[in-house]
Amino acid sequence: MTDPDTRVAGALKRLADRAALLDAADELAHLRDRFLLPDGVVYLDGNSLGALPAAVPPAVEDAVRRQWGTDLIRSWNDNAWWDAPTRIGDAIGRLVGAAPGQVVCGDSTSVQLYNALTAAARLRPDRTLLLTDPDHFPTDQYIADAVARVLGLTVRRVPVAELPDVLAAEGHRVAVAAYGPVDYRTGELYDTAALTAAVHGAGAVVLWDLCHAAGALPVELDAIEADFAVGCGYKYLSGGPGAPAFVYVAARHQDAFDHAITGWHGHAAPFAMEGTYTPASGITRARIGTPPLLSMLALEAALTAFDGVELPELRAKSLSLTGFFLDCADILLDGLGFTVATPREPERRGSQVSLRHEHAYPMVQALTAHGFIGDMRAPDILRFGFNALYVTHRDVYGVVAELLRVTAGGEYADDRYAARATVT
Ligand SMILES: *Cc1c(COP(=O)(O)O)cnc(C)c1O
């Protein structure tokens, strides 16, 4: 009989060796150099705030000093500020399977949701139901309620698993189904193609919130015939804190896109300064007002981290990382009270792994204190996000080994990890 400490030491050694082999064989390993990651930090929260791409600081410096400081107002033309929302929209479009001319970048996800959901519901004026996920990110649920209040609709919260049955039974009353491809807490990935087809089968329109999918895995908006989508710029797209979001309006809906916030940048002739709104044609009408250009140019530079990267390759590496995390957790954390909240089947897994534990909060605090950054979501989820552009298998091994250390040794129970900060 080997004693438990020897067994654990052997398992740690074998997993560390496997991490080294997997990293040595990783053809995307060089992409990590496109990010400025601090020494001594393992960053597994890129699903909440992406790491800083190396291309961003010089782009922001140029935007501030030359474009703003020197070229001043002339930049709207000379530095192509005016076209930034559609130009950057097209760059995001490449990552979400959208042909050019269907994505606009700007504002926050919450604002884009409000606008797109309103437009989506108005495409089905004779219908009264707006379906959304009871486990959707809170802002998505609040905005569904807000849109319903203004348009006189009823929101029904239907879990994804029940959506096909509800559509089959009552689909004729459904105007819009607003869902996300990935559950932000558990990391479960849904079949967007099948769900889109089910929504269309009922004659309704679908709105996908891509916050946890864009830049993390292949999303084929055109191929699945999605109607609308929104997503944020600061998670897997690594555009920086408060980076502008984006909205996708399928080309076939653009002429009928009747949204809530009709701003002057979406006018057919913005500089005619007319007193009434005439929508521009094409995706341009989804523009609202003056965009946050510094943030937008930072996001544009951040997107160059994807240059030459094919999403299926990125997906393969992401699955290797999350699969390896599950293996490490099964072997090292057995018997310590953790359960895995993320589906084990690769096709049902986004780019994160979530564990449940009653002491999730202090455990995540203890990990952070030692430079392993994940996050927690109430009440009991430890969440680890894997941006395959910069996360290594060595990082994965490291965080699970550290979780074992702070848990088995009881360090997480230390008083200093108990106090809750505003942002968890
Ligand atoms: C992150 C996230 C948001 C954030 O919305 P903001 O307006 O950017 O604060 C919205 N929805 C989902 C599904 C998210 O994951």
Image (cartoon, grey):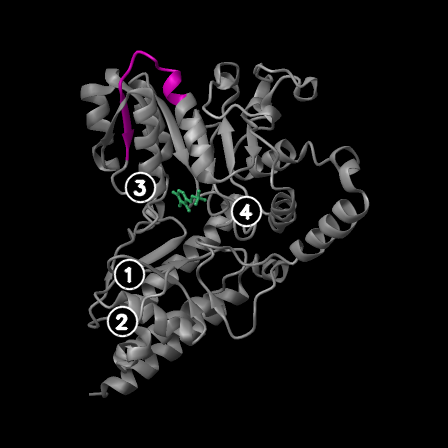
Asked if the residues shown at circle 3 and circle 1 are in contact, with their CB atoms under 8 angstroms apart, the answer is: no
Marks 3 and 1 sit apart, C-alpha to C-alpha, by 18 Å
Of circles 3 and 1, the one toward us is 3
Query: Mark 4 belongs to which amino acid?
Result: Ala
Give the numbered dot on residue 243: 4
SS at badge 3: loop
According to the image, label 3 marks what residue? 136
According to the image, label 1 marks what residue? 355
> Is residue 224 visible to us here?
no
SS at badge 4: loop
Q: Which residues are magenta?
A: 120-132
Query: Mark 2 belongs to which amino acid?
Result: Leu
Q: Where residue 104 sits: x, y (%)?
A: 56, 32
Query: Mark 3 belongs to which amino acid?
Result: His
Dot placed on the residue nearer the N-terminal end, 3 or 2:
3
Of circles 4 and 3, the one toward us is 4
Quarter occupied by the N terminus: bottom left
